[in-house]
Amino acid sequence: MRPPVHKLKRAAGVVALVGLVALMPAAKSSSDAVGQVTQYPLNGTTNAGIADLLTTLDGQAWFAQFYANQINRISKTGQISSATSNLPANAGPRGLAVGADLNVWFTEVTTGAIGRISPGGEVTSFTNGITAGAQPQFITAGPDGNLWFTETGVNQIGRITPAGEIKEFPISNSAEFITDGPDGNLWFTEPGANQIGRITPAGKVTEFSAGITSGGYPWDITAGSDGNLWFTELKGNRIGRITPQGKVTEFSKGIPAGAQPLGIAPGADGNLWFTQPGTALANQIGRITPAGTIKQFSTGISPAAGVHGIAPGPSGDMWFGELAGNRIGRIATGAPPLPNRARIITASTAKSVINVSVRVPGAGIVSVLGESAPASSTPLCWNAQTATKAATYRLKCSLLTTSSPTNKEALSVRLKVLFTPTGGTPSATARTVKIKKN
């Protein structure tokens, strides 16, 4: 039996739904003491099944409610509003991510589809190319400009382009969580097989089990600020670290017996933060340093909250979900938000290719997407790259054959650039370029 839905998304899948040319205002660090908790009750459906959460450019957190069949958002002051009113009936929304197109993408577990939400709240569902019974679970933005998702029901990893084209890749076992890695690949957990998987953007799969405690049940996985991947072991009661080469180290000192680590995400303080609902819905948030030192926090979390997923917020704090308590919580890390402002330095054209140079302030993913100006529903080109440090990165956006200029007039292309730092929230900017006929 699968543990209850719970995931709150790490930074690599943050939502961006604001004006494209305006960057997020510099957020101030929280004045709260490290570990101080603030809780926000959710009105309406009880036991709605908080399944995934993302922090937006404007400081709001979007969250999927699996059982209530809703995707809502909560502001920093606790105001709740609906993100969309036209989800398909019984869709079962679970995973959330933002694409290079700056739309919100989500999984529809029950209907077996991938959904997309426009800035205006319009939902489009994609099913063509998804195997019947796939049960898509979690989704993340990839280092190639596409979105990648797990298909628990059919032992596959799926990839969907910003244009909605889907391709599936077989794996040996059922996968749950997936994240982009610091090595330019996608990493996922296989709880039942006690393995961590890696898939390249080209679809080559490698699986790792050495070093993982027997029966550990690796559950959530995320990239850390140290260049490694970190994961929770639900049944092994451990936090695991795996290098891009596949070497595993486990940490258990400081984790109470029966804590059942579930959600994990990188913080602006350079540490990893994780939730522990425990066998009796215990209420602890853990923090682990890159060296493996663990500290626990529980003060201020309501009894029987059932803390589950966790994600970085725009003020340097961490946001988490309370499955049993039907609340969203925020815990202070004591760190200011990470720099997140990407800057387009140059954008030149060569026939049907746009070459973009982007300056980013640190590690993360930088993506570019071109669309016609004014925008159409189908993007003209897209690409992404994994940033390992503060530097200038060059991305090539090759226009689709059907999008190349066909007359003497120049084609206007609106470039959207999104940067999502590891352990932080995203920023977006845009520029319009013109391409002449070949």
Image (cartoon, rainbow, N blue to C red):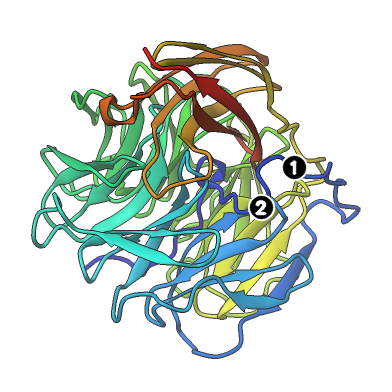
Going by the numbered disc 2, the residue's amino acid type is Val
Q: Of helix, strand and loop, which one carries label 2?
A: loop
Query: Viewer-proximal residue, 338 or 305?
Result: 338
Percent position of residue 354, x then y: 48, 17
Tell me how far mark 1 sits from mark 2, CA to CA: 8 Å
Question: Which residue is at a point 49% across and 45% down the rendered structure image?
Answer: 375
Q: Position of residue 248 (x, y in %)?
A: 37, 26
325 vs 25: above or below: below
Element class at badge 1: loop
Residue underneath mark 1 = 22
Q: Residue furthest right?
A: 31
Name the image quarter holding the N terminus: bottom left
Question: Which kind of residue does numbered mark 1 sit on?
Answer: Ala
Which numbered dot is residue 18? 2
Q: Is residue 373 left or right of residue 166?
A: right
Image position of 168 (left or right of 351): left
The answer to which of 156 and 225 lies nearer the viewer is 156
Query: Residues at badges 1 and 2 in contact (C-beta under 8 Å)?
Result: yes
Whether 110 is drawn above or below 96: the answer is below
Q: Residues within 10 Å of mark 2 (few under 14, many from 20)?
A: some
Residue at 73% in and 74% down:
78
Q: Of 219 and 103, which appears nearest the observer? A: 103
Taking the image as drawn, is residue 282 in sight? no
* Residue 187, x across and y down, in percent: 34, 34
State left or right for residue 138 relative to residue 113: right
Residue projecting furthest to the front: 408
Quadrant of the image for the C terminus?
A: top left
Which residue is located at x 34 percent, y 62 percent?
A: 124
Disc 1 crowd, CA 10 A, few/some/many (<14, 14-19, 20+):
few
Q: Where residue 428 appears, x then y in whole percent?
A: 65, 38
Q: Residue at x 49, y 16 (%)?
A: 395
| Quarter of the image where one finds residue 297 | bottom right
